[in-house]
Amino acid sequence: MSTGLVLAAACSMKWTAWPAVAVATALLGWTHGRRPAVRCGVTATAGTLLLVLPSALLSRHAMVEQVLAFPIGLGGVATPADSPLPGRLLADLGPVGWYAAVGLLLLGVLAVGASLLVRPPTGPASAAQRLATGLCVGFLMAPAGRFGYLTLPIVLVAWAWQAAPKGSSRVVRRKAVLPCRGVDMPPPDSVHLLGGVGASAAAGPATEGGRSR
């Protein structure tokens, strides 16, 4: 519940926080199950609507202009920080280029969304990396983009790299197997696999002439 409320507060202040809802929901679904994930998604979505709805009703034109039209390059006022990113360069080619940029943007969003379903993040670090990937796709392919937006995914990647647990060596060292008392074991050099050790131990005491030594 608290995660959904935090996401709702962030999404109501900045539209760039909206992709975090999908990533957080996928992460909770993997780590805590379906019910907490659905609760988080519903809380974040409903909370965002409740916080944004009053402003949207009072100033509908500004809401559409700044939240919907501006990111796709259809706003009445162009940003002075407009940068020559791929989406903007395509949009400058005319209507065909604009449709190509929007199409590539939608394909990128669908690809990242599919990755959350097929291979959801398993921890905060992987969730931050997936969110950074989605934001990079959106910022690069948006018809009205600027370099300053890329600061956010860079910070996420840096945090994920620092927060990721440093994995220990996966080399499995074979422990020395001590012979049991009363059991003849083969020389150590002849034992190469644990299976060989188990087979030798299972054979029991060696016999000579049908009797135990």
Image: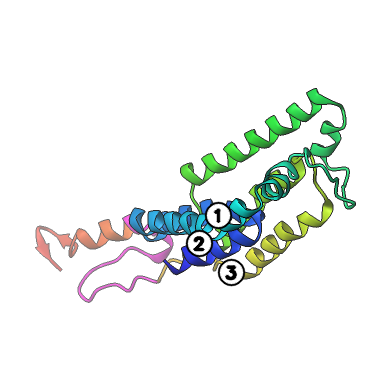
**Quadrant in which the C terminus is drawn:** bottom left
For disc 1, the marked residue is: 53
Can you give x and y, in whole percent of width and height, for residue 166 in the image?
A: 58, 69
Q: Which mark is residue 123?
A: 2
Q: Nearer the viewer, mark 1 or mark 2?
A: 1
> Distance from label 1 to label 3 (Cα)?
44 Å
Q: Which mark is residue 210?
A: none
Can you give x and y, in whole percent of width and height, for residue 3 in the image?
A: 48, 66
Q: Is residue 192 visible?
A: no
Q: Nearer the viewer, mark 1 or mark 3?
A: 1
Q: Earlier in the sequence, mark 1 or mark 2?
A: 1
Neighbor class of circle 2 (other Cα within 10 Å; few <14, some 14-19, many 20+) is some
Question: Extreme front residue here?
Answer: 58
Between 104 and 207, the one nearer to me in the picture: 104
Residue in the picture at 41% in, 70% down: 175
Residue in the picture at 41% in, 60% down: 31
The part of the chain drawn in magenta is 176-195
Residue 153: name its quadrant: bottom right
In contact (CB < 8 Å): disc 1 and disc 3: no
> Distance from label 2 to label 3 (Cα)?
14 Å
